[in-house]
Amino acid sequence: LEAPAEGAAELRYLRLRGGPLHADLAGEIEPASRAGNLSLAAGWDDLTRLVAGTDSPLAGALGLRLDAELAADLETVMVDLEAKGNGLQGLPPAATAVVGAEPGLSAKLELRELRQARLQGLRLDAIGLTLTGDAEADLETQAVAGRFDLVVPDLVPLGEALASPLAGNLASELDLGGSTQSPELELHLRGRELLAAGLALQDLDLEARAVDLLNAPAGSLQLRLGPADEALALASGFLLQGQRMELSELRLDGPGTEFEGGLSADLAGPLLEGSL
């Protein structure tokens, strides 16, 4: 550590070692303006010791790297984050099929005047999926916005882990909006060449929109399932107020099938009323 009477204070290294845990911190900060940079490299080299004394078979290692750039008076703070798993074992079978032994996570976080937060370039790479996304929030106005994309290219390994036949691929897009008090979302889910429980479902397309998620969720959904010439199509509006769910403009179409109407359900009852 070097801290001159004037100028930036420099932390050349701060090293922590304790069994499988290790952490190294270095950086440089100008005390007057609080501008500077910090770097942290940390990891846990043996997860077996973390769960010692339990029945968990968890094993492997985790690593973390974080680099931060601080502007004068903390007007902006930029953080680069990278995390990596190595030789992970002992997770539940479904998690192992999706996460794998060496998942990797990276993202950039920007804070402006400790008021606006922006998540950029979020990326999770795992053996069974890829997740990417960006998001931002304003702590004063409470506005939020973002988009996340998830791709599962092959459902077969997940089906094997669950001992239930699965096949095909899935892709989803989730858009966030509104505010922290009244968030909104829009979901698009697409599946192709789907096989589940011995049924050849072929195609799946789902679109859902919802507003006021924390108070009285309301919105609409459209679902189409099956091959193009035999698809089952479901559409409905919905509103959840307390323990009461309203399904409006409900319509179900399929081969030789057509339903339309509206339903109201008391989730605490149960009581179902309406017409089809």
Image: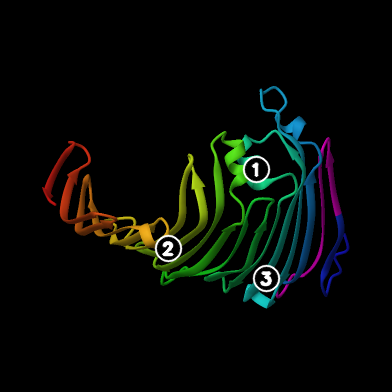
Label 1: which secondary element: helix
Marks 1 & 3, CB-CB < 8 Å contact: no
* Total tally of numbered discs in the picture: 3
Query: In the rendered structure, which amino acid carries the disc numbered 1?
Result: Ala
Which one is closest to the eye, mark 1 or mark 3?
A: 1
* Frontmost residue, 121 versus 108: 121
Q: Which mark is residue 97?
A: 1
Residue at 86%, 69% in the rendered image: 4
In the rendered structure, the answer to whether residue 84 lies left or right of residue 91 reads right
**Chain part drawn in magenta:** 14-33
Task: Give the residue number, with chain letter if any, for mark 3.
Answer: 78
* Frontmost residue, 219 versus 221: 221
In the rendered structure, the answer to whether residue 200 lies left or right of residue 275 reads right
Predominant SS along the magenta part: strand
Residue 21 is inside the magenta segment:
yes
Crowding near pointer 1: few (<14 within 10 Å), some, many (20+)? many
Q: Which mark is residue 56?
A: none
235 shown above or below 266: below
Task: Give the residue number, with chain letter if any, for mark 2.
Answer: 187
Q: Marks 1 and 3, Cα distance to the nearest angstrom?
A: 34 Å
Give the image location of residue 256, x and y in percent: 24, 54
Query: In the rendered structure, which amino acid carries the disc numbered 3?
Result: Met
